[in-house]
Amino acid sequence: MTKYLRLKNVLSRATVLTTVLFFSTVANAVSQDSLLRYKYFFLEGIRQQEMGNISASFDLLRHARDINPSAPEVYYELAGYYVDMKDNKMARLNFERAVELNPDNSTYQERLGQFYITQKEYDKAIAAYERLYVSNKARQDIIQILFQLYGAQSNYKKMIETLERFELVEGGNEQISLTKMQLYEQMGEKRKEYEELQSLVNKHPLELNYRVMLGNWLLQNNRKKEAFAVYKSVLKEEPENVAAQLSLLDYYRETKNIKMEEDLTVSLLKSRKTDKETKMTLLRHAIINGRSDGSDSVSILQLFDKVLTLPQQDADIIMLKAAYMSLLKAPQESINRLYEQAIAVEPENLRARIALIQSIWDSKDYDRIIELCKPAQEYNPEEMAFYYFQGLAQYQKRDNEAALVTLRKGISQIKKDSNPDFVADFYAIMGEILHEKGLDNDAFAAFDSCLQWKPDNVEVLNNYAYYLSVLGKDLDKAERMSYKTIKANPTSSTFLDTYAWILFQQQRYDEAKNYIEQAIKNNSELNDVVVEHVGDIFSMTGNVEKALEYWQRALQKGNNSELLKRKIQLRKYIAK
C-alpha cells in the first residue's frame, strides 16, 4: 500500500484506550481470546501510526476490525484514513458505523457532522450536530455551526430558534437581537421584528442608542410621527446626542423640512461632539445634493467655514474643501491657501504638500518648492517625490552640486516596487548633471541605470547616444539606441539629427544625408549645432555648395566656433 499523509485524529489516545476497555466488558461481543487479539492489533496500529508507519498502521487497523467488527473506535480510526485517500464512500460508512456503535460519543458525532459538511449534505450534518447539541448545550461553537447550517438552507425559523439557544448560554445582547430582527424582516414578520427591538429597548432603558435604533426602525417603516417622538425623547435626556441628531436629520429630509434640516446640519457641524467622519459625511451630502450649476456653492462653502472655525486634528476636512473648490474651478491661489492651511495643521500630509508643489511648479518659484520639499523629507523620508522636486528645482536654478546631493538621497529610497517612471527620471537628471560636469563615465552609468528602469525613455536614449557619438565611443551602441528613438517618433528633427550624426561618425555618409534631410523637412528652424551638422554631411557627400550654405547659416545663428570658420574658409569638413 502506498504511503499518504495522515490527518491528525481528533480522538485522543486516552479516549481510544477507554473505548477499548469499555468493549472488553461486553461479554457477548467477542470471545475473551478474540478481544485480547483485537486489543493487540488495534493498539499496535495506533503505535505504528504515531511512528509514521502509515501503511502498516492501516493494515493493522483493518485486521483489528475483522477480529472485532463491533468496536466503534476502529471504524473511527479507519474513517480518517479513507478521508486522506479521498475515498468518501468508505469514509462515510466508517464514520456512520462508529456513531451507530457508540452514539453517545461526542467526538464521533462531531467528526461525522464535519464530514457531512464537506460533502455539502447539510440535512445530515444538521441531524448530527443536533444530536451533538443534546449532550453539549453549553458549547457555543456547536450552536454557531447549527446557525450556519440552517442559514445555508435559508431556514429562518430554525435560525431564530438557534439564536435563542445562544441567549440561554450567554444571555441576550444587541447583536443577537439585531440578527433576529433581520431574520424576521426576511420572513415578513414586521410585528415580531418590532417586538424584538422594543424588547431590547425595555431591557436596557438607559441605553439611548437602542431607543435611537427604535426610532430609525419606525422611520423606515413609515411611522414618522412615532419616530419623531422617540428622537425628541432621546434629545430631551441628552441634547447633544449625535446619533439622535443624525436620525432626526434623516427625519427632516424624509418630511422635506428643508429649514430644519439646514439648521440641524449647521448645529452638527459646529458641535465639538460630532466626530470628524460624521462632519465629512454631512459635507459630502451637501456637495452631492447641491445644484449641478454650482449656484448653491456659497452656502456649501459657508458650511465648510463653520466647521473650520474649530481646531482641526488633521487636514481631512481642509482637503475636502480644496477638492470642492477645484471642482468649482476656483482660482488656484485660493486653493493653494487651503493646501498651506492643511500643511500647517498636518505637516506630514503628503497629498497637501505634493498638490501645492505641483500647483506652483509652473510659476518657476523654485525657492518656494525647495522650501516645501526640505521639511517633507523629515516627515516622509521614504517619499521620493520630495527629493525629485527639490533636485529638479535646484537643477533649474543651476545649483548642480546641491541637486546631485538631493537626487542621490532620493535614489537611496528606491525599492523593488518603486514607480519605474519616477526612478528613471532621477537617473536621467543625474546623468545630465554629471555630463555637464564633464564626468561622462558617471553620466553614462546613470543613463544605463535609467534605461534599466525604463528601457523606452526616448529622451535619455537620444541624449546618451548623442554624447557617445560626440566622443566617438561605442558607436554601435549609440546607433542602436538612436534608432529606437526614430522608430518611436519618426518625425522628431532632434532624434533624426542624432541618428544622422551617428551614421556620419560611422562614415555612413549617404545614409546620414538621407536622415538629415528628413530632419530638415520636419523642422526648418534647426539650431546652430544641427545646422552645422547638415553642412558637415553635405560636405562629405560631395555637395560643397550646400555645405557652405548651411555652415554660413550656422554662423548667422550664433555659432562662432573657430572650427566652423575654418570649414568655411577651407571649403571642406574638418573633424578637429
Image (spheres, grey):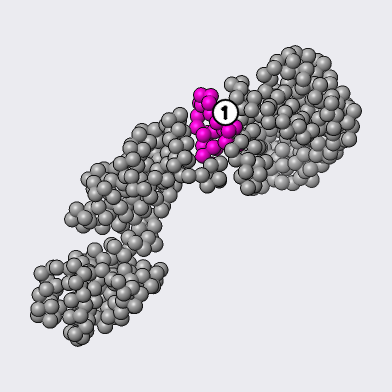
Can residue 174 be seen here? The reply is no
Relative to 181, does residue 273 appear above or below in the rendering? above
Residue at 80 percent across and 39 percent down: it is 152
Residue 222 or residue 336, whichever sits in front:
336
As for residue 321 lying within the magenta part, the answer is: yes
Residue 182, percent from left and from top = 81, 32
Image quadrant occupied by the C terminus: bottom left
Can residue 366 be seen here? The reply is yes
Structural crowding at the residue carrying mark 1, measured as other residues with C-alpha within 10 Å and reported as few (<14), some (14–19) or many (≥20): some
Name the residue beneath numbered marker 1.
Answer: 306
Task: Magenta stretch: give its range.
Answer: 300-323
Residue 149, quarter of the rendered image: top right
Residue 278, percent from left and from top = 63, 29
Q: Amino acid at mark 1?
A: Lys
Residue 157 or residue 427, whichever sits in front:
427
Residue 301, quarter of the rendered image: top right
Q: Secondary structure at mark 1?
A: helix
Residue 12, quarter of the rendered image: top right
262 vs 205, left or right, is: left
157 vs 468, left or right, is: right
Residue 448, percent from left and from top = 31, 57
